[in-house]
């Protein structure tokens, strides 16, 4: 299939996904209350100043000023210095979390990281203007129906105004569309283009489409790659991205010469050995750590000496520490436990070590989750804390901007037209060395406008 044919196929698939997402929203109109229509330019009701004027002292000062955020953007200014605990006698403010924790695709690190940071907020950062923050978790599995049920649960919860949505692939589209249609602030784990084209649906995660752009920009500019083999998980949920990967690679001066589908067998040496070792780079877009391990073992057996890139699902903490993917590079849409991360990463690890349980980590999706926890707290404070409404919190999200999220570069919403839901961010490109993440190349800015050509 030629690149143009692939692109036409992809665009048709995108339109089909848009129709599916729209139908998901329509099917749930009876279950969800009538949605308010907040105006993006409308100010939040409670804040007196910009919501993100926190002192950027997370870990930069030796006198532990990392928690000295000034919450002056709310009418009831509170002391946010280290050691200031939330007042348990005050009414709690709540954050909803749709957690994919059941069945095949499970991400327990998301719940663990969010809960650790909520506990940190309450113990050291005065909760939300003195009010304790409470995390309300709705567990979901592989089936989209479970995510739809969670979305409707939060739509009907009058005391929950922001939802961290950890759904994966089509699950995030279905639940996110329901939340957006009901006017509920949704912090999504974006996976498909429709996540960024749905009104009032905002994502600080670029998903596979956005990461594909980062892959190729990084591979071309930092590794001088011109030809590439693509290894794709033999999964119907991932297969539709193939034409987009070809098109994005070509737009960045990289030619993908072949696609090799990988199954979920423990030994993938056979299919990996069929790849062209003359190509400058190999790109693995796989589904989970076990498949990444098998692919890495295959590449090692073949003795491939070019540049190897893997998607973020191959960068779990256990897999990194195993040494199996030494030499690989890939994106982390959040802070990561890099050995060269400096004081800010040290502070993240301090919080995780102090308040986290056995499942908590900043690798995998844990780093994304801790960032969303910080954003959710910011939005609740900007929206009025205990006086927040769906409208005020969504208005705060639609104009959100911050340079104070631990481990993140500057982020802001909305994204470039027409990708309003692709909030501006820069994934961190890490390279694995000796079982550790390093970040010699730092952040790679993601400009979704560079993907406009995919819309035809």
Image (cartoon, rainbow, N blue to C red):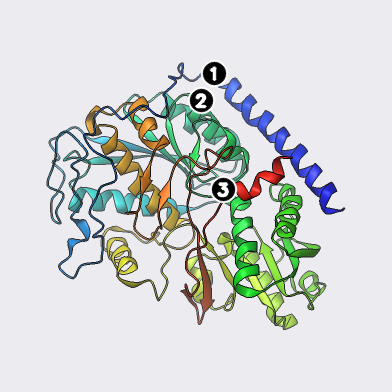
Residue that mark 1 sits on: 29
Q: Position of residue 186 (x, y in %)?
A: 45, 36
Decide if residue 266 is in sight here: no
Q: Secondary structure at mark 1?
A: loop
Query: What is the spatial separation of the Cα atoms under label 1 and label 3, in whole angstroms?
Result: 28 Å
Q: Position of residue 381 (x, y in %)?
A: 26, 38
Q: Earlier in the sequence, mark 1 or mark 3?
A: 1
Task: Determine the residue located farthest toward the right in the rendered image.
Answer: 1
Q: Secondary structure at mark 2?
A: helix
Q: Is residue 323 above or below residue 419?
A: below
Task: Identify the residue at image location x=48%, y=64%.
Answer: 443
Would you say 93 lies left or right of 72 here? Answer: right
Query: What is the spatial separation of the Cα atoms under label 2 and label 3, in whole angstroms?
Result: 28 Å
Q: Is residue 113 above or below residue 175?
A: below
Of the pair 303 and 244, the residue shown nearer to us: 244
- Quarter of the rendering containing residue 310: bottom right
User: Badge 1: how crowded within 10 Å, few (<14), some, or many (20+)?
Assistant: some
Of the pair 105 and 330, the residue shown nearer to us: 330
Mark 1 or 3: in front is 1
* Image marks 2 and 1: residues in contact by CB distance under 8 Å: yes
Q: Earlier in the sequence, mark 2 or mark 1?
A: 1
Would you say 202 lies left or right of 234 here? Answer: left
Residue that mark 2 sits on: 181
Query: What is the spatial separation of the Cα atoms under label 2 and label 1, in whole angstroms?
Result: 9 Å
Q: Quadrant of the C terminus?
A: top right
User: Badge 3: how crowded within 10 Å, few (<14), some, or many (20+)?
Assistant: few
Q: Position of residue 323 (x, y in %)?
A: 54, 78
User: Badge 2: how crowded within 10 Å, few (<14), some, or many (20+)?
Assistant: many
Task: Identify the residue at image location x=54%, y=66%.
Answer: 315
Task: Identify the residue at image location x=53%, y=38%.
Answer: 420
Residue that mark 3 sits on: 103
């Amino acid at each position: 299939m030629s690149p143009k044919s692939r692109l036409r196929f992809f665009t048709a698939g995108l339109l089909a996904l848009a129709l599916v997402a729209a139908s998901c929203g329509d099917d749930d109109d009876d279950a969800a209350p009538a949605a308010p229509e907040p105006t993006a330019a409308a100010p939040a009701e409670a804040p007196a100043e910009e919501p993100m004027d926190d002192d950027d002292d997370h870990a930069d000062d030796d006198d532990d000023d990392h928690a000295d955020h000034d919450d002056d953007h709310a009418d009831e200014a509170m002391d946010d210095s280290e050691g200031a605990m939330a007042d348990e006698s005050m009414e709690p403010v709540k954050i909803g979390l749709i957690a994919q924790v059941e069945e095949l695709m499970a991400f327990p690190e998301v719940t663990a990281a969010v809960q650790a940071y909520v506990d940190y907020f309450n113990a050291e950062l005065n909760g939300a203007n003195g009010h304790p923050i409470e995390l309300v978790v709705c567990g979901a599995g592989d089936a989209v129906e479970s995510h739809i049920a969670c979305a409707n649960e939060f739509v009907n919860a009058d005391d929950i105004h922001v939802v961290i949505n950890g759904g994966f692939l089509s699950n995030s589209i279905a639940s996110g569309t329901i939340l957006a249609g009901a006017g509920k602030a949704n912090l999504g784990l974006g996976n498909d283009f429709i996540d960024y084209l749905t009104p009032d649906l905002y994502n600080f995660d670029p998903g596979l489409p956005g990461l594909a752009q980062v892959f190729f920009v990084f591979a071309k500019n930092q590794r001088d790659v011109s030809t590439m083999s693509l290894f794709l998980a033999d999964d119907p949920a991932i297969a539709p991205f193939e034409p987009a990967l070809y098109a994005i690679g070509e737009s960045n001066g990289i030619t993908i010469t072949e696609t090799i589908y990988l199954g979920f067998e423990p030994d993938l040496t056979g299919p990996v050995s069929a790849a062209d070792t003359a190509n400058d780079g190999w790109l693995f877009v796989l589904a989970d750590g076990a498949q990444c391990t098998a692919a890495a073992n295959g590449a090692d057996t073949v003795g491939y000496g070019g540049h190897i890139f893997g998607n973020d699902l191959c960068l779990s903490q256990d897999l990194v520490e195993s040494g199996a993917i030494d030499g690989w590079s890939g994106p982390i849409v959040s802070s990561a436990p890099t050995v060269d991360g400096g004081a800010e990463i040290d502070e993240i690890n301090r919080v995780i070590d102090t308040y986290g349980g056995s499942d908590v980590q900043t690798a995998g999706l844990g780093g994304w989750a801790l960032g969303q926890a910080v954003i959710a707290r910011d939005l609740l404070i900007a929206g009025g804390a205990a006086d927040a409404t769906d409208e005020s919190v969504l208005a705060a999200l639609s104009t959100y901007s911050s340079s104070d999220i631990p481990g993140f570069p500057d982020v802001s919403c909305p994204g470039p037209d027409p990708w309003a839901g692709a909030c501006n961010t820069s994934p961190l490109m890490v390279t694995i060395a000796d079982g550790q993440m390093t970040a010699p190349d730092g952040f790679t800015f993601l400009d979704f406008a560079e993907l406009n050509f995919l819309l035809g």
